Image (cartoon, grey):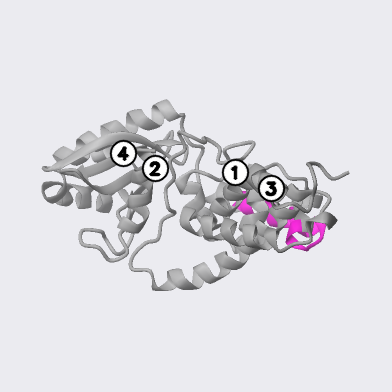
Amino acid sequence: MRAGGRPGTLDQATKDFLSARPQLFGIAYRVLGSAAEAEDVLQETWVRWQNTDRAKVREPAAFLTTVATRLAINLARSARVRRESYVGPWLPEPVDTTQDPQLGAERAEALEMAVLLLLEKLNPVERTAYVLREAFDYPYARVAEILETTEANARQLVSRGRRHLAAERKEPVSPTAHRRLLEVFLSAARTGDLSVLEDVLTADVVSYSDGNGIRGASRIPVTGRPHVSRYLVAFAPRFWPRAETRWVEANGRPAALVSSGEQPVALLTADISADGIDRLMWVMNPAKLAPYVASLSG
């Protein structure tokens, strides 16, 4: 039986869409790593929902999820091509999770910046299968239906995602421990304390600066403890003297918003395990930074 009121009315269509919207955004954002692109997907989903013969749709939420997910996959394929011309490392667009900690998911899986970055190495279908199963706990049969594949293949797609993340990422620490080590790092980065930096960074640490060509952002990832620590020490006199930091939350983890005067210049997030800081992620691209900062003020 179809839930809701009269299926043909625009009022009921709006209610159905708004009810499903948080989950639709949660799926699209995880598949794309971009809040702006996820909103584009939702806009197109709404247009298609308006133009659908809704009297024939028994489960609006399921229909909308299928449409939005397939649109996100298509957009992800074209986004991979566009990102080939991106200047320097590409990082996911950060989101403020203080208002909606799970972005419509039953579990806050596949939401951290580091996870979204690692999922970029999967193809869009593999990534989507992982998101649907791990973040939203969809049964494999439903994943297969959305992806238009077999249940056995859906299981294989999810398994690839799990293996990829297990091979690339260590178990993260608690939010409290995460912030504590990030505070130590920031203090050492500000003062150029090489010994402390070397102590908190893991041997194979990687620092990514997403600036899309803006001044001051490294155009290649800096890898390895010696290179990252020395880079930070050399960078300190130019970056930190006029900088102020504010503690925020991004993608479910503590983060530091760095401003010069009243102008935000970077959002620092990190991937931290029991061994130390594995990844530093500096979002400096104004196109990504500005929407995040605006969301902090409501």
State which tag comes first along the sequence, 2 or 1.
1
Q: Nearer the viewer, mark 4 or mark 3?
A: 3
Residue 232, given in percent of the width and then of the height, sits at: 21, 48
Residue to which mark 3 is pinned: 11
Proximity of marks 2 and 1: CB atoms separated by less than 8 Å: no
- State the CA–CA distance, disc 2 to disc 3: 28 Å
Residue at left offset 68%, top offset 59%: 50
Position of residue 26 relative to residue 253, above or below, is: below
- State the CA–CA distance, disc 1 to disc 4: 26 Å
Name the secondary structure under disc 1: helix
Q: In this image, 289 relative to 161: left or right?
A: left
Q: Which residues are magenta?
A: 146-163
Residue 71, given in percent of the width and then of the height, sits at: 63, 63
Q: Nearer the viewer, mark 1 or mark 4?
A: 1
The three-letter code of the residue at mark 3 reads Asp
Name the secondary structure under disc 3: helix
- State the CA–CA distance, disc 2 to disc 1: 16 Å
- State the CA–CA distance, disc 1 to disc 3: 18 Å
Q: Which residue is at the front of the view, 136 or 205?
A: 136
State which tag comes first along the sequence, 2 or 3.
3
State which tag comes first along the sequence, 1 or 4.
1
Q: Nearer the viewer, mark 1 or mark 3?
A: 3
Residue to which mark 4 is pinned: 256
Residue to which mark 1 is pinned: 22
The three-letter code of the residue at mark 1 reads Pro
